[in-house]
Image (cartoon, rainbow, N blue to C red):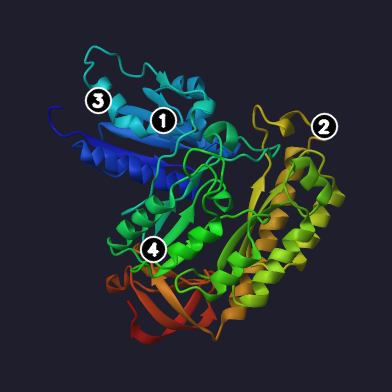
């Protein structure tokens, strides 16, 4: 390679994608590329795609256009779930030069160097390198560093569940895990970078241990992982990202309640409050189990934050089913909702089911649940006023304010002070501002 080339990254979708983007970015740096912001002129733009919703698909095209406006001569590379599911569709997007599938994305620098060494090759030819998803049976560890105040640590990939609306098994392959040794080593590496919080991420992290050594036998469980991570010195906070209710065991909840580093925050997918719809979705639990999980968490951690994923407008969801879901969520002691409007995904069972819900009805139901989420978050925040918490402050100056999160995920704000960035302080939560965020008073000087 001649002069140092510049590379920029854009990530769509989940925390897992962010961890993988960061790992891919480090491979570019090791190869002598300079990383720049996506809004700047670069020689290569790498877009890590998502295909959970129709909206994520559409956003890809607009992001490609954005990169082309900055530098029309740049190479554009698509990786990620959408790139695995519909590689040729992405390759046909004007401006896209290279599409890499589930296993190929971690060798992106090799493919890029090949392109850069082909001066005769015309820009925008849309080259595709994509494996059969059955070949995605090996594990590549990842974690994010330098992009945010907290790090996302990938511990598991793929999924063996057969939910009728989901394309993730088609995009990421079978469930498989990082080795315990590698996860712990990565956690130590992260802690050495003065990062205060690690978020565990994966497709189905409660399934951790499956495929750890290339087989389906569980050498370790998610509970084992939590126990060992809690012993790693230098990590101030550990946070569990989304975990299936049937895989969140009482023992794990109990351990978190007594943990040195794990914080009282859970994000547990529900998807529907109707057992009829849960069966159609082929979820592995009924709503009664969900009640048990929430009750157990609140029993041992009364101030815990509980987030919920829910899908509205699934085929066959009648007004009665939706009201059942609404009333069920309203009755639960939860803190906020992530609401997804159902969108048809190719090659899924749900895409050909009867009882299609009109899009305007889906939108109306989504709006109702978003309103419920705002109500739940407000009630949770109000329950925390007067309590003392430790806040980790973020790194952005947003309109003159710095934001941060307590252990139990209450978002706070105070006038911008760069000395607070990436520091932990004990505070007393005092009031909720007009924008719904919480003000506080400092209780102690710098904690860490």
Q: CA distance from mark 2 to mark 4?
A: 46 Å
Q: Secondary structure at mark 3?
A: helix
* Figure quadrant of residue 280: top right
Which mark sits nearer the N-terminus, 3 or 4? 3
Q: Residue at x 52, y 53 (%)?
A: 220
Which mark sits nearer the N-terminus, 2 or 4? 2
Residue 407 lies left or right of residue 359; in this view the side is left
Discs 1, 3 touching: Cβ within 8 Å: no
Give whichever of 380, 348 is nearer the camera.
Answer: 348
Q: CA distance from mark 2 to mark 1?
A: 34 Å
Mark 1, other Cα within 10 Å: few <14 / some 14–19 / many ≥20: many
Which residue position holds label 1? Answer: 78
Q: Which mark is residue 398?
A: 4
Q: Nearer the viewer, mark 2 or mark 4?
A: 2
Which residue position holds label 3? Answer: 113
Residue 55 visible at all: yes
Q: Residue at x 73, y 34 (%)?
A: 350
Q: In the figure, 442 relative to 187: above or below?
A: below
Q: Secondary structure at mark 2?
A: loop
Which residue position holds label 2? Answer: 354
Q: In the figure, 300 relative to 144: above or below?
A: below
* Figure quadrant of residue 127: top left
Name the spot of residue 61 as percent of width and height, x first.
47, 31
Q: CA distance from mark 1 to mark 3?
A: 15 Å
């Amino acid at each position: 390679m001649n002069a140092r080339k510049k590379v920029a990254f854009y990530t769509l979708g989940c925390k897992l994608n962010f961890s993988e983007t960061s790992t891919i970015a480090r491979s570019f740096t090791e190869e002598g590329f300079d990383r720049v912001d996506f809004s700047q002129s670069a020689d290569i733009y790498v877009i890590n795609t998502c295909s959970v919703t129709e909206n994520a698909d559409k956003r890809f095209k607009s992001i490609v256009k954005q990169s082309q406006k900055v530098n029309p001569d740049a190479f554009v590379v698509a990786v990620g779930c959408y790139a695995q599911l519909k590689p040729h569709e992405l390759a046909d997007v004007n401006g896209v030069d290279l599409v890499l599938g589930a296993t190929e994305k971690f060798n992106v620098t090799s493919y890029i160097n090949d392109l850069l060494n082909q001066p005769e090759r015309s820009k925008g030819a849309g080259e595709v390198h994509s494996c059969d998803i059955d070949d995605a049976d090996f594990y590549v560890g990842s974690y994010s560093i330098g992009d945010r105040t907290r790090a996302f640590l990938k511990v598991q990939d793929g999924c063996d569940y057969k939910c009728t609306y989901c394309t993730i098994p088609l995009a990421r392959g079978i469930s498989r895990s990082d080795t315990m040794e590698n996860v712990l080593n990565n956690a130590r590496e992260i802690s050495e970078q003065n990062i205060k919080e690690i978020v565990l991420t994966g497709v189905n992290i409660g399934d951790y241990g499956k495929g750890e050594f290339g087989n389906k036998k569980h050498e370790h469980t998610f509970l084992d992982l939590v126990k060992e991570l809690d012993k790693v010195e230098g990590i101030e906070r550990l946070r569990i990202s989304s975990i299936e209710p049937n895989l969140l065991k009482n023992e794990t909840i109990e351990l978190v309640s007594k943990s040195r580093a794990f914080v009282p925050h859970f994000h547990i997918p529900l998807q529907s409050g109707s057992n009829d719809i849960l069966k159609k979705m082929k979820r592995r639990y009924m709503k009664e189990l969900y009640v048990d999980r929430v009750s157990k968490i609140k029993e041992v951690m009364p101030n815990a934050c509980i987030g919920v994923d829910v899908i509205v407008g699934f085929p066959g969801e009648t007004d009665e089913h939706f009201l059942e879901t609404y009333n069920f969520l309203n009755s639960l002691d939860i803190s906020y909702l992530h609401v997804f409007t159902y969108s048809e995904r190719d090659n899924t069972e749900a895409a050909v089911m009867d009882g299609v819900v009109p899009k305007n009805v889906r939108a109306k139901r989504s709006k109702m649940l978003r309103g419920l989420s705002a109500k739940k978050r407000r009630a949770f925040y109000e329950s925390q006023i007067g309590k003392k918490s430790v806040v980790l402050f973020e790194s952005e100056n947003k309109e003159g304010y710095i934001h941060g999160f307590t252990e139990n995920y209450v978002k706070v704000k105070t006038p911008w002070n760069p000395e607070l960035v990436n520091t932990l302080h004990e505070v007393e939560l005092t009031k909720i501002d007009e924008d719904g965020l919480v003000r506080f008073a400092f209780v102690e000087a710098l904690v860490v």
